[in-house]
Image: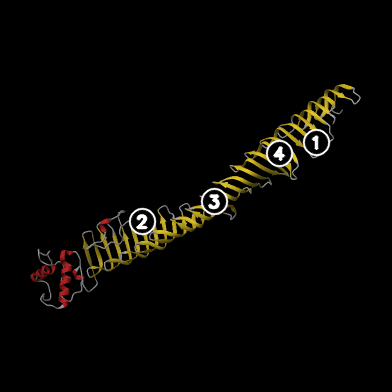
Amino acid sequence: PVNNLKRPYSENLNEEQLVIKKPKRGESPIESAQSTINNSSNVNRPSLNNTNEQSQNWISTLVSTCYNKLFTVDPFITTQGKIKWELGEYEGSIRDGKPEGKGKYTAFTGATHEGDYVNGKLHGYGEIKFSQYKVINTLRSHDNKFQNITDLFTFTYYKGEFSQGQFHGKGKWDQRPRSGTLYKGQFQNGSKHGIGKETSQAGSTYKGVWEKNKVIVIRKATFLDGTVYKGSFLDKDLHGPGKRLMPNNSSFKGYFQAGKLNGFGKEVSSLGLIIYQGSYQKDRRHGQGTFRFNTGDVFDGLFDHGSMVAGTMKYQNGIVYIGKFEDARPNGPGKLIQNGSIYEGQFINGLIYGPGTQTDQTGKLIYKGDYIFGARHGQGLRFFDNGDVYTGQFQAHEMTGQGKITFQNGFYCIGTFLNGKLHGNGTDHAPNGKIIYDGEHKLGKCHGQGKYYLDNGDIIKGNFKTEK
């Protein structure tokens, strides 16, 4: 309002007392104002012919104040007033026809800009709000209109420091209704630049260093599920040495690429125990590594995209397996060490299956033959510590079926066996191959109908008892 102006003359002038019309064609605003003032009887004014500088300043102030009621100007004195444009209005401190000092601009779209102004631009501390979340291209800067703060109003709320009409210094930029981010930190020339923190609408946060709106160093990132990233970042992804802390307090530490572990790393449980240590590829165990199961079992070997493929498994019960794996179980060729014995052969689902051998720790052969689901089954050879040897059929790990057992003294038996003993029809032989007995047996002894061959050539036929 004109009443707020500090003038050298006319103490009682107000807008209701004096209205200056638009200048006629060929007439300047000053001439139009002079004409109005000369025709006004209620204005205390200096002479228009006075060349005194104060008089001319007052005329300029008066013309600027009343002309179309667009703006209020004091050429020399900072004052309070309003400036109106076709897109909105400014209210606050004014100097030389421009916002200067503290003020507020309100656009007809509902946007508000409030803060410190220097030479018509936000400079210092300020606040910007929008009622509609869209780009407002109509507020681009040009002559006689409000100076825009940035090239495009893509934000919805800003509160902080300005310099030359741009975000500069510390501030808060809230874009969540539009792009889903809230940034608090440092700005430079209208861009996020320096140390800051960004929070997405989903609740994820990034703390680090920005350069021209792009994060270049993130010291810490927190996600909605509670996962926390610490280390080196590239485009908001862990890149380089870093650590990922999971919601259950377990963690991954190592070298990251594009947010995923690549290269050497380790996984630590919530209790601080190392679960895995070795090579990674795209967050999966890949290459050489050591994995510890919660049962106490430990695998050391080769991984392929998260799966154990070959290596050594040390079970908590003392069993050791060396060989191929599938689905974390021995599968394929391998070797199993248990209770002093070494089993070698093909394994399926953790059990030896098919042709295989069993030796003791000295390498002495104990069994050679077929296995089914970890048990001797089928044809095989069994070597005993006392020198006895059985060759024949096995069932459920026992010598059962047709076979031959040769004793260390050279005598041998051929026939049907049950649980390692001749049971049923069979023959007993001397080392030279001579038949000693031919007939029925029971649990390794002659029993039932049979023939007994004496050294003198006599043959005894009859029914034999087990005690004979």
Say whether residue 293 is visible.
no
Of marks 1 and 3, which one's residue comes earlier in the chain?
3
Q: Which of these two is toward me, 25 or 288? A: 288
Q: Which residue is mark 4?
A: 357
Q: Amino acid at mark 1?
A: Asp
In what element is the residue under mark 4? Answer: strand
**Residue at x 26% of width, y 61% of height:** 141
Check the image and report above or below for 167 versus 312. Answer: below
Q: Quadrant of the C terminus?
A: top right
Q: Position of residue 287 (x, y in %)?
A: 57, 49
Mark 4 touching mark 3, by CB under 8 A? no
Q: Amino acid at mark 4?
A: Thr
In what element is the residue under mark 2? Answer: loop
Between disc 3 and disc 2, the foreground one is 3
State left or right for residue 208 relative to residue 49.
right
Q: Position of residue 95 (x, y in %)?
A: 24, 70
Quarter location, residue 307: top right
Say whether residue 264 is visible.
yes
Of marks 4 and 1, which one's residue comes earlier in the chain?
4
Q: Which mark is drawn over residue 34?
A: none
Mark 2 touching mark 1, by CB under 8 A? no
Residue that lies at the very extreme toward the right in this rendered image: 456
Residue that lies at the very extreme toward the top in this rendered image: 461
Q: Separation of disc 2 and disc 1 at Cα?
A: 87 Å
Q: Which of these two is toward me, 331 or 171? A: 331
Q: Quadrant of the N terminus?
A: bottom left
In what element is the residue under mark 1? Answer: loop
Mark 1 touching mark 3, by CB under 8 A? no
Mark 3 touching mark 2, by CB under 8 A? no
Q: Position of residue 347 (x, y in %)?
A: 64, 39
In what element is the residue under mark 3? Answer: strand
Q: Which residue is mark 3?
A: 280
